[in-house]
Image (cartoon, rainbow, N blue to C red):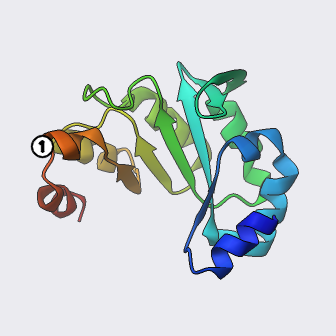
Amino acid sequence: MKTVKQVLKAGVERVILSTAAVEDPQLIREACQKHGESVIISIDAHEGHIATRGWRMETGLEAVEFATSILQLGVKRLIYTDIGRDGTLTEPNFTAIAELAEAVRLPLIAAGGVSSLTHLKILKLLGVEGVIIGKALYSGDINLKQALATAG
C-alpha cells in the first residue's frame, strides 16, 4: 500500500496491480477502498490460467474465476493479457476476452496479439474499453492515428 500511495501522490493517474493482486487479495480490497478508480487489476493468462512473476510462474488459477472472485473487493477496471499471444502479431484471444467481459461486466482493457484495425473493431464490439498495442505499432502493422480514429 505504501508504494501505491507514493506512486499516486507523485501524480500517476492509475496503478496496475498484477502479481501482488493475485498473491494478496487484501491488498486489492485496501487499495480499491482508498483509491477507487485509480487501481487497475491486471490479469496475465496463458490458456485461461493466470501467470505471475513476469509470466514465469503458472498459478493454476483460472482467469475468469479469479476475476469474478475479486469483484467484491471493489475492483473497477481490469486489464487482460493473453501472454501466449502477446508480441505474436496473430490476433487477440477473442473468446477468452468475450468470456471475461461477460463475467465481470467492468471496463476491460485487452492486450496480446492485436495486429490490425479489424482486431480493434472486434474488441470494441465485445465491449472492450481499451487496447494495449505494442509490437504492431513498432512493426507498422497498425498506424497509431488510424487506431485512435477506429477506437473513437
Q: Nearer the viewer, residue 6 or 26?
A: 6
Residue 136 horizontal side relative to residue 77, left or right: left
Q: Nearer the viewer, residue 150 or 132?
A: 132
Q: For mark 1, what is the residue?
A: 140
Q: Position of residue 107 (x, y in %)?
A: 51, 57
Q: Position of residue 36 (x, y in %)?
A: 69, 71
Q: Position of residue 130 (x, y in %)?
A: 38, 55
Q: Quadrant of the N terminus?
A: bottom right
Classify mark 1: helix, strand or loop: loop
Residue at x 23% of width, y 65% of height? 152
Residue at x 22% of width, y 36% of height? 115
Hey, which residue is sitting farthest right in the picture? Answer: 26
Q: Quadrant of residue 138?
A: top left
Name the amino acid type tagged 1: Gly
Q: Quadrant of residue 2?
A: bottom right
Residue at x 66% of width, y 32% of height? 52
Residue at x 63% of width, y 33% of height? 64
